[in-house]
Image (tube, rainbow, N blue to C red):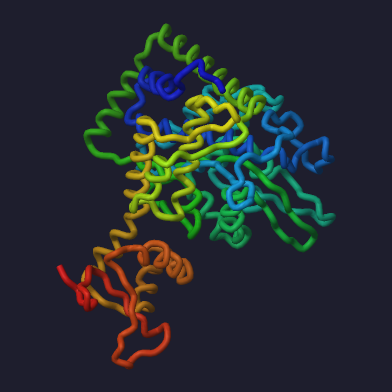
């Protein structure tokens, strides 16, 4: 493992010298995402669908991530995927694109490499502002061959960025791209793309990591995407906006000497990431072991069951980028040091603030009331899931059912029968089920 730099402090120093504002709690999550991406490649890239030696129809010739080692992380006897996809929520001017550009902007991004097509470093791309399902995942011609260069296939092993995530959602509501969300769900989760079409199949596995930004007014996640996206929240207020403007003045007035020094820093950081990737692929660990303190943190009540694996991935990515030494058997020991504790706590707070906003809306609207479940589902569909009744059902099951202040019951007076008779109660209850407090 590479140990030349403490990449967390080095990258923060670079951001400070560039007068970046309020990134101390966000940059570490991006670094962990890169580490989780590397580990995912160690675990899964021996099963490459684009290996020219296997006669792949579409081949990525110079992929530095391809190898022939066995998987090392297989919970539930399956090849676990450890990618951390990031969604940044923030108002206009909050710096969402600044974070994406920091890593992936052409020529200046820290992960960008002019030789990526030749197998040097990661592939990076800031995607189009509009995209179709076929452009993202592929289609077939009359002969059954995949046509064009679908991004999910083209960017396998790389970082695919969208400055506005709503482009994906908007495409999913158009007639020619109705399968966008379903394909996105599986490609972000297991990497699988599997489409049965009139003239043939589009079938492959991809391992891109998605980073995207969105505005609060456009924040809309289809059911299941919240399990696959790590949420970063950028809150804006007048004081912070003033700091942004002062920072822009400082950035505009940098001297030529400062700009040269910062360009040298970019080169140094870029070289570090390439070396980290290369060393990790050439000298991979043989496995990982989570210490009890990590499991104890994940078991806290504020971490939902479907979120637990996201935080495990964050811990894996952190230890990869930290350069944690392996033990005598080649196992990475995933423990909870002070820095990882800080990253986990901050990321949990941001996730709760974003993901629980809808929960708070429903709770505050119906607090200390009873209403029929059918009525609740209609209200949830209207207020949260854009009219989708089935998604509203899943939302209630995933978000309301686990809450101690919410319960469903069937009145025992015999006046109602079946599922339609279920009543939803918002509020704390006594031993007899009556609302209290």
The image shows residue 105, relative to residue 389, as above or below, that is above
Q: Residue at x 74, y 43 (%)?
A: 49
Q: Residue furthest left?
A: 437
Q: Residue furthest bottom?
A: 414
Q: Residue at x 48, y 40 (%)?
A: 290
| Rendering coords of residue 355 (x, y %) | 37, 53
Which residue is more in the foreground, 93 or 356?
356
| Rendering coords of residue 349 (x, y %) | 32, 44
Which residue is more in the foreground, 157 or 258?
157
Q: Quadrant of residue 293?
A: top left
| 248 left or right of 327 in image | left
Q: Quadrant of residue 158?
A: top right
| 356 left or right of 197 in image | left
| 73 left or right of 423 in image | right
| Rendering coords of residue 411 (x, y %) | 30, 85
Q: Residue at x 40, y 54 (%)?
A: 304
The image shows residue 355, relative to residue 290, as above or below, that is below
Quadrant including the C terminus? bottom left
Which residue is more in the foreground, 416 or 182?
416
| Rendering coords of residue 57 (x, y %) | 81, 43
Which residue is more in the foreground, 61 or 261?
61
């Amino acid at each position: 493992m590479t140990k030349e730099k403490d990449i967390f402090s080095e990258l923060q120093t670079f951001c400070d010298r560039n007068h970046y504002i309020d990134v101390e709690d966000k940059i570490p999550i991006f670094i962990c995402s890169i580490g989780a991406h590397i580990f995912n490649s160690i675990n899964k890239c021996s099963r490459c669908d684009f290996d020219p030696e296997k006669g792949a129809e579409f081949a990525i010739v110079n992929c530095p991530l391809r190898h022939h080692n066995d998987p090392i992380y297989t919970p539930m006897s399956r090849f676990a995927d450890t990618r951390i996809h990031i969604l940044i929520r923030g108002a206009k001017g909050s710096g969402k694109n600044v974070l994406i550009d920091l890593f992936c902007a052409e020529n200046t991004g820290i992960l960008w490499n002019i030789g990526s097509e030749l197998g040097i470093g990661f592939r990076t791309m800031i995607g189009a502002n509009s995209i179709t399902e076929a452009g993202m995942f592929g289609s077939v011609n009359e002969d059954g061959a995949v046509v064009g260069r679908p991004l999910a296939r083209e960017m396998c092993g790389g970082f695919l960025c969208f400055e506005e995530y709503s482009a994906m959602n908007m495409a999913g509501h158009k007639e020619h791209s109705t399968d966008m969300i379903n394909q996105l769900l599986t490609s972000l989760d297991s990497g699988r793309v599997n489409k049965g079409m009139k003239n043939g199949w589009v079938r492959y596995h991809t391992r891109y990591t998605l980073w995207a930004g969105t505005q609060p007014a456009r924040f809309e996640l289809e059911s299941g995407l919240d399990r696959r996206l790590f949420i970063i929240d950028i809150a804006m207020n007048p004081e912070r906006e003033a700091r942004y403007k002062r920072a822009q003045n400082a950035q505009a007035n940098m001297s030529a000497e400062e700009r040269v020094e910062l360009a040298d820093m970019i080169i140094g950081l870029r070289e570090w990431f390439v070396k980290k990737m290369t060393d990790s692929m050439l000298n991979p660990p043989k496995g990982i072991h989570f210490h009890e303190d990590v499991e104890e943190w994940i078991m806290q009540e504020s971490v939902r069951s479907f979120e637990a694996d996201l935080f495990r991935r964050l811990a894996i990515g952190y230890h990869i980028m930290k350069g944690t030494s392996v033990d005598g058997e080649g196992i990475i020991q995933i423990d909870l040091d002070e820095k990882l504790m800080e990253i986990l706590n901050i990321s949990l707070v941001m996730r709760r603030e974003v993901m629980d906003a809808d929960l708070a809306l429903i709770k505050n609207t119906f607090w200390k009331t009873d209403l029929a479940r059918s009525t609740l589902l209609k209200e949830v569909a209207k207020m949260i899931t854009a009219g989708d009744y089935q998604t509203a059902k899943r939302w209630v099951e995933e978000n309301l059912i686990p809450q101690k202040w919410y319960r469903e019951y069937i009145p025992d007076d015999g006046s109602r029968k079946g599922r339609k008779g279920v009543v939803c109660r918002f509020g704390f209850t006594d031993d007899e089920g009556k609302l209290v407090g």
